[in-house]
Amino acid sequence: MRKHLAATLAGLVAIACMALILPASAAPEKIIIDTDIGDDIDDAFVVALALQSPEVELLGITTGFGDTKARAAILDRMLGETGHADIPVAIGTPSNANPGGFTQRAYGRGGHFARASHPAAVDFLLAQIRKYPGQITLVAVGPAPNIGELIARDPDAFRKLKRVVTMGGAIAPYDDGWGGTGTPHPEWNVKNDIPAQQKLYAAGVPVVTMPLDSTAHLKMDEVRRSRLFARGTPLSDALALLYLQWSHGTRQATPTLFDPMTLAWLLKPSLCPTTPMHIVVDKDGMTRQTAGPANAQVCLKSDRAAFMDFVMQRLDR
């Protein structure tokens, strides 16, 4: 009896020790993507990357800036075509901003997987934050009217986000991906809602920023594009259609994957190491590092090859 008891205790001790040694599998990171999908092509790659990453739980997607209903129609079809019609799509307040830059509108026409209705973006964000306080990462990859409205309506709720990971701004001269050097200027996502960006950096929520410094050189070459689009999966077919519409509308062939670095960082932080900084957005939309306590973690440099390998590995599944 004593031998049996001793063996049992030894076994329990061994199991307990193994539990200390082996890490428990982490629960998926809860995220919401806030996007202006339909203008540039990189937003579609953010959504695709999220769909292919079991480390994240995509609670929903909110559309912001310009024709937010047409953006929702693109997402309805993309999610439906890829078997993810259960993921909520919420619509931000529409505006007349940048109608000529909406290159992928045709993809959302025709009512493919169209939903009968969509919740309002800020209502949806507030409901999710209150349901999961301190657990949600907001991946913000467009101009930020939804963020500005959310902070104005309920700043306390906004501070219950786990963090905001955003693409925007330009801090220092950067590699433009074409063999030249880009000069800091009011970057698109920032300049199209300067007050919202100012509120974001003053809100007291952890912010991780991927400016042009670490994203402008992320060109997706023809070899990688051809390999991905030849996969013939529902997701690669959706990306190929959206890419072709973007390419035709802009007369460009090589996309820059600015926005996907936000999600890539979340999945593998070593792809874009960050530095604590005090960031302010001035009245002209310039994103500047100034003296003061850090209010953001900023990635100023990334490895294009490592990033592209990571994205392709995920989307090639």
Image: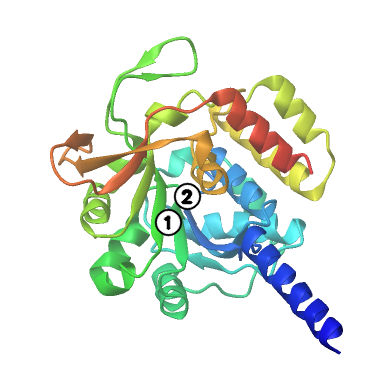
**Residue 266 visible somewhere in the drawing:** yes
**Image spot of residue 279 (x, y percent):** 22, 42
In this picture, is 252 found above or below 57? above
Occupied quadrant, residue 88 = bottom right
Residue holding disc 1: 64
Please give left or right for residue 10 compared with residue 134 in the image.
Answer: right
Residue extending farthest top: 179
**Image spot of residue 210 (x, y percent):** 41, 38
In this picture, is 181 found above or below 103? above
Q: Which mark is residue 36?
A: 2
Asked if the residue at tag 2 contacts the one at tag 1, i.e. Cβ–Cβ closer than 8 Å, the answer is yes
- Residue sitting at 37 percent across and 56 percent down? 95
In depth, the one of 71 and 175 nearer the eye is: 175
Occupied quadrant, residue 244 = top right
In depth, the one of 248 and 129 nearer the eye is: 129
Q: Amino acid at mark 2?
A: Asp
**Residue 251 visible somewhere in the drawing:** no
